[in-house]
Image (cartoon, rainbow, N blue to C red):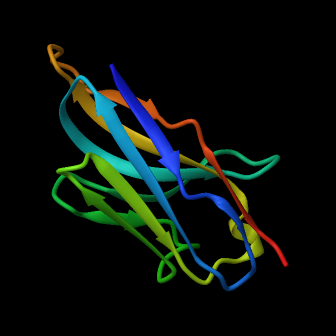
């Protein structure tokens, strides 16, 4: 019904920056909240940032002031600009979208396949 394709991960030195993208496609009627989560080895998946359909944003305390989430509704795409990256930001980053598929009257949660972000010198 809805597919998510992420891009933009990679290896970066401490203090560097990366920009993640996640494009949604398929039988989409409407997209509501979009966001990014991350999971480091041995840890649970945690929220990084979300943006509502009304452009209200929410950030984890650990990334406030360094990461910026944004969305392009025309492209069904959510972005995560990450600045001043730290080794503790190393994780697999997952895109999350809350969407209503065409022909269905319910909201569903969709997840991307994950993209690795490694911050190391």
x and y percentages locating residue 22 in the rendered image? 42, 48
Closer-to-camera residue (120/8): 8
In this rendering, position of residue 74 left or right of residue 45: left
Q: Which residue is located at x 62 percent, y 58 percent?
A: 9
Residue 10 versus residue 95 in the image, above or below: below
Residue 40 versus residue 114 in the image, above or below: below
In this rendering, position of residue 94 left or right of residue 76: right
x and y percentages locating residue 68 in the rendered image? 41, 72
Residue 5 versus residue 68 in the image, above or below: above
Number of marks in picture: 0
x and y percentages locating residue 93 in the rendered image? 60, 51
Closer-to-camera residue (101/109): 101
Q: Quadrant of residue 99?
A: top left
Q: Which residue is located at x 16 percent, y 57 percent?
A: 54
Q: Quadrant of the C terminus?
A: bottom right
Residue 120 versus residue 1 in the image, above or below: below
Closer-to-camera residue (118/48): 118
x and y percentages locating residue 32 in the rendered image? 23, 43
Q: Quadrant of residue 11?
A: bottom right
Q: Quadrant of the N terminus?
A: top left
In this rendering, position of residue 36 left or right of residue 24: right
In this rendering, position of residue 50 left or right of residue 54: right
Q: Which residue is located at x 59 percent, y 77 percent?
A: 17
């Amino acid at each position: 019904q809805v597919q998510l394709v992420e891009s933009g991960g990679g290896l970066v030195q401490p203090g560097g920056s990366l920009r993640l993208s996640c494009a949604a496609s398929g039988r989409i009627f409407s997209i509501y909240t979009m966001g990014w989560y991350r999971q480091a080895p041995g840890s649970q998946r945690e929220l990084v940032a979300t943006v509502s359909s009304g452009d209200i944003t929410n950030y984890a305390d650990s990334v406030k002031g360094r990461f910026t989430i944004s969305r392009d509704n025309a492209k069904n795409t959510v972005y995560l600009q990450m600045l001043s990256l730290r080794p503790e930001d190393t994780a697999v980053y997952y895109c999350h979208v809350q969407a209503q598929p065409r022909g269905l009257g319910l909201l569903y949660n969709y997840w991307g396949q994950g993209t690795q972000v490694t911050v190391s010198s």
